[in-house]
Image: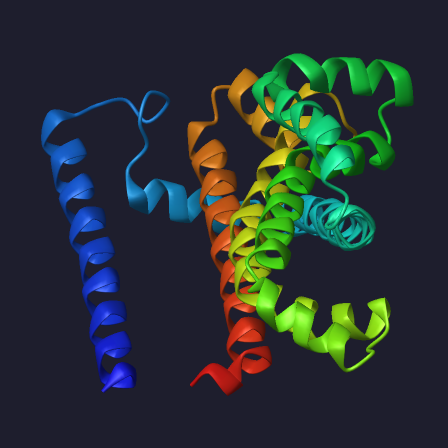
Amino acid sequence: MKKSQSLENNFIFWLTICFMTLFTEIFLSLRDIPSFIFPKPTEIFRGLMEDKELLLSHTLTTVYEAFIGFTISIILSLIIGALIYDKKRIKEILYPFLLISQTVPLIAVAPLILIWFGFGILPKIIIVVVICLFPILISFLDGLNSVNQEVIDLFKVMRARKIDIFRKCLFPASLPSLFAGLKISVTYSVMGAVIGEWLGAEKGLGIYMTRALSSFRTDYLFSAIIIVVIISLILFKIIELIEKFVLRWKG
């Protein structure tokens, strides 16, 4: 039942995409809008094919930065969460700083990170970590704190060590919440990498977009945007598949 519903949803999604593409092509052709303002889908596809080798090189750089930054965010979130989940005072002190890190516009912080750490790959990875850490850590902590206290007390009655309670009770129970944070953050990771590249880089989809825009090649610009969307969807789907495998016990 679920499988057939999923196939139906996928069919409706792709049918909608095809309809919107066809509608856009016809509308832009009838209105005779210049391609440097808004290129037709066929022109975007042509640009994608013309510059595919350069686009592939920039794409690999962006994916690398997003992957490394996202992985570091997961590791830091798991370590910090495991250390402070039962320390109420520390959480009360730490939460405002985590919240502040999300209220400051990334576009304002990113230039400072680039000034401090240069224009290499490192500042882009740091930007990805900054943008991904909060949702993962908060989701993980919420999952750990959602466990019924009576279950924890039962483990204590059986003289289970603190590490055993965490490993066999708290961590497995936190996984659904953790994966919710991962699915949100994995798309943020691509956005963070692109923003960092957009402000200053030698390679990556962000700098590719900047160069395309400065030369009025909006077909190349839209090609890069489409690739960013595709990468985000693929990464989201990968996390979703891992979630289904890890949480297969949930049915």
Q: Is residue 234 visible?
A: yes
Task: Classify residue 189 as left or right of residue 87.
Answer: left
Relative image position of residue 147 (x, y in whole percent): 58, 63
Q: In which quadrant will I find the N terminus?
A: bottom left
Relative image position of residue 220 (x, y in whole percent): 49, 35
Task: Locate residue 106: give its quadrant.
Answer: top right
Task: Classify residue 241 as left or right of residue 222.
Answer: right
- Residue 209's place in the image compared with 86, above or below, is above
In depth, the one of 211 and 67 nearer the eye is: 67
Q: In which quadrant will I find the C terminus?
A: bottom left
Relative image position of residue 150 (x, y in whole percent): 59, 68
- Residue 13's place in the image compared with 242, above or below, is above
- Residue 199's place in the image compared with 98, above or below, is above
In depth, the one of 84 and 14 nearer the eye is: 84
The number of discs equals: 0
Task: Classify residue 6 as left or right of residue 71.
Answer: left
Q: How is the image coloured?
A: rainbow
Q: What residue is drawn where x is 27% and y is 82%? A: 2
In depth, the one of 50 and 8 nearer the eye is: 8
- Residue 39's place in the image compared with 18, above or below, is above
Task: Classify residue 204 as left or right of residue 142.
Answer: right
Q: Is residue 203 visible?
A: no
Q: What residue is drawn where x is 71% and y is 33%? A: 130
Task: Locate residue 27: give its quadrant.
Answer: top left
Q: What residue is drawn where x is 51% and y is 56%? A: 180
In depth, the one of 199 and 1 nearer the eye is: 1
Residue with the most extreme front position: 157
Residue with the most extreme right position: 117
